[in-house]
Image (spheres, rainbow, N blue to C red):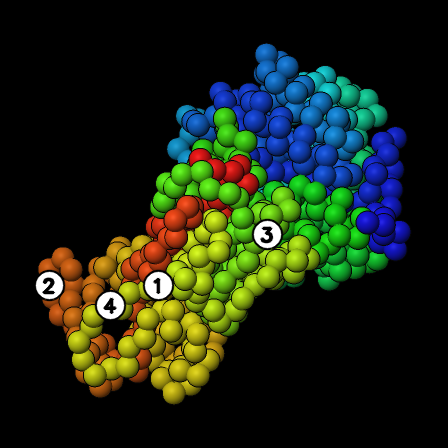
């Protein structure tokens, strides 16, 4: 591959006295690979791999400055503790060894407890309750505030002593420094009633401690007219802050907790149209971030005046993002879909739905074991047949092709993608199509034959020594007696644009697990003009299976929509234009007008009726073993390829 000299993102940049090899920054994030407040070997391995992929600067997140800003699980790095400096040093060295500038982001959560019970009382500038918390915080006294300043100073000193090139102060996303910047949250009448006072003192204290090493400030434009810290506020405050306590760069993003990690419904970087205005307002290096995934958007931001562009989740999906783009191999970038699943659940550490190489502590990759269906004797290795071109089958075929093996993919449908393609048909879920397109392109680039509309028989597969079944799952029909038109969620997503105009009152019978099948039916119906959508569920609520980020953003999208939720009910029968409902607790029956009923049924494995030939090895992966998430399908597809490549049992 030839280095692309036409890309602005590939050009170098100097931050203070630090040379950056390009203008792409891995902005602050964490994987929770931290034990008792100290980074682990798994943590260092993650940052080393990311830095080796080519990012110019890497900012580590999840680093707290004081005990009252930690969580009981203690998966935030406790930067104020000198006794963990050796563990932090391994993190810093991992980044610098990979050729990137290493910056440690420091945060005090303040009143935002991340939804977790804490050992300490939440604190803030004033006793103003966060919309995301049940109670107002304890207001900090002047002495308390000064202790916060010192906590940042000590944490910055420890970080630099451990090998970081500088620090970034997290004054965004509604955390403590942002709470002081907000005109709604900061109602003080003392010296800290000046909204920049705390942050200016923190910068000055750190500057006295670490000298001329860079200090960055991350701020976020918070949503809503009454947020107290919108874009206009930032444009007013940032020049004044820099004049009072100069700092090295500003990192501008958007949102607060549960909105600052946008889901796949956000298809364009929120700040892209504001870069020119931000550039005119700030006379220091400008880093813009959030929602950047496409090279065209990155280049547009740089052309509009940004000096640096930041991303986090795209580096989790593919740490080689920069190397591939700069070398002209953008087609091979494994795309972040914006699904906010593995990277936001921390079970026990962060992962990625589309990146099987990111595993938990103690595992080199995501754990996955294909189901071995036959145990033949040793047979000569031959070509491989993969049945199914969904995420599992395509991942398996890609991995096999990279080893030089001969592989053919058979797909009974006329298009590749399986359940991912179906999910992408729904409103606000197009991110999955990016992954389908990526896998399809990679198969083409690797020369893999894909036979669409083909369901081979056992006889037709006899010449293949190894078979991988990746045939997915199918949704069962929920038996609801009656006259009303009833569709499975699968059938509805395939035709909702035609169904809803003729049946504008849509009822969705969810299965009670609150996952995307029912939610996508709701959003898709509304997107094409449904007059009324009613969700009936035996569960206790709507969208209960989603991560907090996805659920919050979903509810924001649905605000004002003609949507009703009928919880703890089921549908017993239908008549023309009406449903009969029964409460699952007391048995009370009601009626509901509707033009069409969409049911979310159990997904069950779909396997072909296959009789293996003598000596054939057959494995099954993904939903045709047990229907689960795309993360399982991708990991098992990769693991099956590795098992096949390893040779006979």
Q: Are marks 2 and 3 in contact (CB under 8 Å)?
A: no
Please give the label number shown on residue 474.
1
Q: Is residue 160 left or right of residue 180?
A: right
Residue lying at the far top of the rendered structure: 83
Q: Is residue 364 left or right of residue 461?
A: right
Task: Tell me how far mark 1 sits from mark 3, CA to CA.
Answer: 29 Å
> Which residue in the protein does label 2 denote?
587
Residue in the foreground of this view, choosing between 375 and 208: 375
Nearest to N terminus: mark 4 or mark 3: 3
Task: Tell me how far mark 2 sits from mark 3, CA to CA.
Answer: 59 Å
Q: Secondary structure at mark 2?
A: loop
Task: Tell me how far mark 4 sits from mark 2, CA to CA.
Answer: 20 Å
> Which residue in the protein does label 4 denote?
478
Q: Position of residue 529 (x, y in %)?
A: 45, 80
Q: Position of residue 643 (x, y in %)?
A: 49, 39
> Which residue in the protein does label 3 denote?
406
């Amino acid at each position: 591959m030839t280095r692309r000299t036409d890309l602005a993102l590939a050009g170098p940049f100097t931050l203070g006295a630090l040379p950056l090899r390009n203008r792409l920054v891995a902005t602050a994030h964490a994987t929770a690979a931290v034990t008792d407040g100290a980074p682990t070997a798994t943590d260092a391995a993650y940052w080393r791999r990311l830095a080796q992929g080519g990012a110019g600067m890497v900012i580590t997140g999840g680093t707290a400055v004081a005990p009252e800003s930690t969580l009981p699980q203690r998966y935030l790095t406790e930067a104020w503790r000198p006794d963990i400096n050796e563990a932090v040093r391994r993190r810093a060295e991992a980044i610098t060894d990979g050729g990137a500038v290493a910056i440690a982001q420091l945060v005090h959560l303040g009143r935002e407890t991340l939804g977790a019970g804490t050992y300490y009382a939440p604190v803030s500038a004033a006793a103003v309750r966060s919309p995301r918390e049940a109670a107002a915080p304890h207001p900090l006294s002047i002495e308390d505030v000064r202790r916060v300043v010192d906590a940042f100073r000590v944490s910055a000193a420890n970080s630099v002593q451990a090998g970081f090139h500088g620090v970034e102060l997290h004054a965004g996303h509604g955390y403590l420094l942002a709470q002081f910047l907000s005109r709604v949250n900061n109602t003080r009448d003392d010296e800290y009633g000046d909204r920049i006072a705390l942050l200016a003192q923190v910068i000055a204290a750190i500057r006295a401690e670490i000298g001329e090493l860079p200090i960055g400030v991350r701020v976020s434009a918070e949503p809503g007219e009454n947020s107290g810290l919108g874009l206009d506020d930032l444009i007013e405050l940032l020049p004044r802050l820099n004049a009072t306590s100069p700092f090295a760069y500003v990192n501008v993003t958007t949102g607060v907790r549960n909105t600052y990690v946008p889901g796949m419904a956000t298809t364009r970087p929120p700040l892209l149209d504001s870069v020119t205005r931000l550039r005119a307002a700030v006379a220091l290096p400008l880093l813009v971030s959030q929602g950047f995934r496409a090279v065209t958007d990155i280049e547009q931001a740089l052309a509009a005046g940004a000096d640096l562009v930041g991303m986090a989740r795209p580096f989790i999906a593919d740490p080689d993002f920069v190397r591939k783009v700069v070398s002209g191999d953008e087609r091979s970038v494994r795309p972040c879909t914006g699904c906010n699943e593995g990277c936001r659940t921390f079970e026990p550490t962060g992962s990625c739905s589309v990146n099987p190489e990111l595993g938990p502590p103690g595992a080199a990759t995501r754990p996955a074991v294909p189901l071995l269906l036959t145990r033949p004797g040793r047979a000569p290795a031959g070509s491989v047949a993969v049945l199914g071109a969904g995420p599992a089958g395509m991942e398996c075929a890609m991995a096999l092709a990279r080893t030089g093996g001969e592989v053919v993919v058979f797909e009974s449908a006329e298009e590749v993608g399986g359940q991912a393609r179906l999910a992408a048909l729904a409103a606000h879920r197009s991110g999955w199509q990016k992954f389908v397109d990526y896998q399809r392109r990679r198969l083409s680039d690797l020369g893999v034959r894909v036979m669409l509309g083909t369901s081979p028989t056992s006889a037709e597969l006899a010449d293949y020594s190894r078979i991988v079944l990746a045939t997915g799952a199918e949704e069962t029909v929920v038996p609801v007696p009656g006259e009303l038109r009833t569709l499975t969620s699968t059938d509805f997503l395939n035709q909702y644009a035609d169904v809803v105009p003729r049946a504008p009152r849509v009822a969705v019978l969810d299965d009670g697990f609150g996952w995307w099948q029912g939610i996508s039916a709701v959003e898709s119906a509304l997107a094409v003009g449904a007059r009324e959508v009613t969700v009936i569920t035996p569960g206790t609520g709507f969208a209960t299976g989603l991560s907090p980020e996805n659920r919050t953003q979903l509810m924001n999208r649905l605000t004002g929509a003609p949507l009703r939720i009928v919880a703890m009910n089921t549908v017993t029968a239908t008549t023309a234009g009406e449903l009969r409902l029964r409460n699952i607790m007391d048995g009370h029956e009601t009626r509901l007008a509707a033009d069409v009923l969409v049911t979310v049924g159990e997904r069950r494995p779909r396997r072909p009726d296959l009789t293996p030939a003598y000596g054939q090895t057959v494995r099954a992966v993904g939903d045709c073993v047990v229907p689960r998430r795309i993360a399982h399908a991708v990991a098992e597809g990769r693991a099956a390829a590795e098992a096949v490549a390893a040779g006979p049992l």
